[in-house]
Image (cartoon, rainbow, N blue to C red):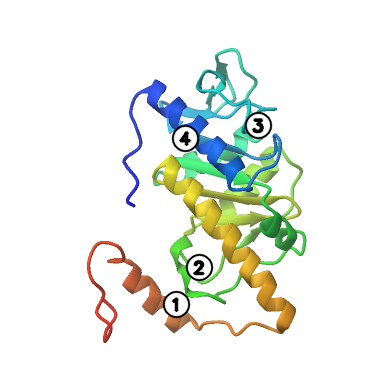
Amino acid sequence: MIASPLPTSETALRNALAAGYRRLARLGLNNGSAGNMSCRFEDGALITPTGADGDSISPEAIVYVTSDGNTRGTGVRSSEWAMHTEIYRRYPVAQAVVHTHSDACVALSCQRRSIPAFHYMLAGFGGDEVRCAEYATFGTDALAHSAADALEDRSACLLANHGMICHAATVEKAVANAAKLETLARQFWMSAQVGEPFILSAEEMATVRSRYRNYGTTALNPRGTT
């Protein structure tokens, strides 16, 4: 299913964020109040409030925050607001951001290792690997810059000893990307239990990215790259 464009009204965006946050909980990507999500709005972002979980989140609780950290509304902004707004500042293509503490992503992030091209679907995040950002304390500007650095030419990364973060053009796509990354992280971990996974070459991954350009919109040629 192709995700619909990002809504333009604040009410619709708040509803989409609340629904997306509940979906993260249903998928098991967040437990309790861990993790957060946002979408670009006006000169800042709408972001889930601190302390919210999948059962208690409501559209009215979503907080508007500027890139300077000023807020509008009664809720308390997420502790990771700076990481979200830094991603929006650096990457205009980012319209929605999801940060989770999902199990497999956390496990790999605690090894401070990137996810290499063990599977062709990693190409969907923009490169030959999903990088692991350098460690920084949660809720700090240092973490915001570390995450944004790791996202250069990528739409997802791991956060050392922390979790993962990804961005997309819509709230629904950002949630889907978070779920896909957790699946790939789990599969990589499972493969590594058997032995060192074979890694696809840069040339093979370039072919995959070429084919991805038309994936889902046209029938792919089984004999070629388009």
Going 68% across and 73% down the picture, which residue do you hit? 190
In primary-sequence order, the first of circles 3 and 4 is 4
* Residue 178 on image: x %, y %: 54, 52
**As shown in the figure, which amino acid type bears the numbered disc 2?**
Leu
Graded by Cα atoms within 10 Å as few (under 14), some (14 to 19) or many (20 or more), the crowding at tag 4 reads many
> Helix or strand or loop: what does disc 3 sit on?
loop
Going 44% across and 82% down the picture, which residue do you hit? 204
* Residue 6 on image: x %, y %: 35, 37
* Residue 32 on image: x %, y %: 71, 36
Graded by Cα atoms within 10 Å as few (under 14), some (14 to 19) or many (20 or more), the crowding at tag 1 reads many
**As shown in the figure, which amino acid type bears the numbered disc 4?**
Cys
Q: What's the CA distance linking mark 4 and mark 1?
A: 30 Å
CB under 8 Å between callouts 2 and 4? no
> Helix or strand or loop: what does disc 4 sit on?
strand
**Location of mark 3 (residue):** 53
**Location of mark 4 (residue):** 39
In primary-sequence order, the first of circles 2 and 1 is 2
The reply to whether residue 85 is visible in this rendering is no
CB under 8 Å between callouts 3 and 4? no
* Residue 30 on image: x %, y %: 65, 43
In primary-sequence order, the first of circles 4 and 1 is 4
> Helix or strand or loop: what does disc 2 sit on?
helix
In primary-sequence order, the first of circles 3 and 1 is 3
**As shown in the figure, which amino acid type bears the numbered disc 3?**
Asp
- Tag in front: 3 or 1: 3
**Location of mark 1 (residue):** 205
CB under 8 Å between callouts 2 and 3? no
Q: What's the CA distance linking mark 2 and mark 3?
A: 29 Å
Q: What's the CA distance linking mark 3 and mark 1?
A: 38 Å
In the displayed structure, would residue 162 be above or below residue 113?
A: above
CB under 8 Å between callouts 2 and 1? yes
